[in-house]
Image (spheres, grey):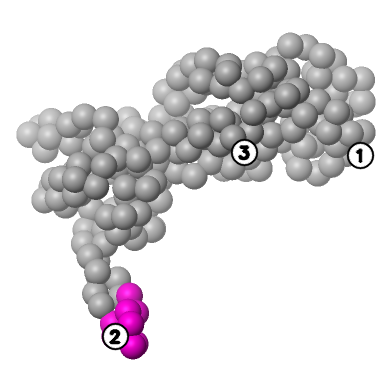
Amino acid sequence: METLAKLFGGQARVKIMRLFLLNNESVFEVEDVVSRSRVTKANSRKEINALHAMGFIKQKNVVHEGTRGAKKKVPAWQLDSSFPYINSIRDLLVDPSLLLREDLSQRFKQIGKIKLMIVSGIFIGSEKSRVDILIVGDKLKKNIIQQIVKSLESEIGKELDYVVLDSEEFKYRIDMYDKLVCDIMDLPHEKIVDNGQLSTYISKKK
C-alpha cells in the first residue's frame, strides 16, 4: 500500500504515468517526457526518479551520435511491464469513461461554431477507430484546436488523431462516400456535440 500511496503524487505524476502506460513499448528521454507531458524539466526529472525507484519504469541508455562521429550514451526510460500493480494502475489511469466524462464540449467551445463533434478511439476504448476526435463546423479556429488537442495529449499521455472539417467539406465527403468519414461514422463513436443538421443529412444519404 505504501508504494500505491506514493504513485499518485499529483497531476504531474499522473500525466507522466499515463505517457508510459499508453506508450508501453516506447523509450523516452527527459526531453521527450517534458514535451509530451508538458511538465517542467525539473518536475519531470523528479517524477522519473521517483517512478524509477518504485520500479514502475526501467532505465535504458540510448546512443546519440555527436560531432565528428563521437557517440554519447543518454539515459532514457521505459515502462517496466513486470511492475506488480501495472494492470490495476492502467485500469485507474487509462479508464476511457473517465476521459470521456471530462467536459470536452466546454474545452472546445471557443473554437467557433461546432455542428458535430464525435469522439472515438482512446475515448471509448476502441482500437478499431480511425480517429479519436472529429470536429465539424464553420469558421473554426484551427490554431486554437491544435492548442487544445496538445493540452489533452499531455493529460492523456498519448498523441491523438483528429480531423477538422467545415460543414460543406463534410457534406461533400459524405456525398462521395469518403472512406475516412464513412469509417468514422460507421465504427463505434460518441457524439459530444450534435445540432441535428448534419446527422439528418447523413441519415438521408443512407
Tag 1 and tag 3, C-beta contact below 8 Å: no
Secondary structure under the numbered disc 3 in the rendered image = strand
Number of callouts in the render? 3
Q: Which residue is mark 1?
A: 176
Secondary structure under the numbered disc 1 in the rendered image = loop
Q: Which residues lie in the magenta part?
A: 64-71
Tag 1 and tag 2, C-beta contact below 8 Å: no
- Check if residue 67 falls in the magenta segment: yes
Find the distance from the CA under tag 3 to the CA under tag 2. Answer: 40 Å
Residue 73 location, quadrant: bottom left
* Amino acid at pointer 2: Ala
Q: Which residue is mark 3?
A: 162
Find the distance from the CA under tag 1 to the CA under tag 2. Answer: 54 Å
Left or right: 15, with 3 as reference point:
right
1 or 2: mark nearer the eye = 2
Residue 163 location, quadrant: top right
Local crowd at mark 3 within 10 Å, few (<14), some, or many (≥20)?
Answer: some
Secondary structure under the numbered disc 2 in the rendered image = loop
**Percent x, y of residue 149:** 52, 34
Compare residues 131 and 151 and report the one nearer the observer: 151
Local crowd at mark 2 within 10 Å, few (<14), some, or many (≥20)?
Answer: few
Is 158 placed above or below 139 here?
A: below
Label whose residue precedes the other's in the sequence (1 or 3): 3
**Percent x, y of residue 201:** 87, 20
Compare residues 40 and 118 and report the one nearer the observer: 40
Q: Which residue is mark 2?
A: 70
Label whose residue precedes the other's in the sequence (3 or 2): 2
Is 97 placed above or below 3 here?
A: above
Find the distance from the CA under tag 1 to the CA under tag 3. Answer: 20 Å
3 or 2: mark nearer the eye = 2
Instruction: Give the farthest residue toward the left.
Output: 2
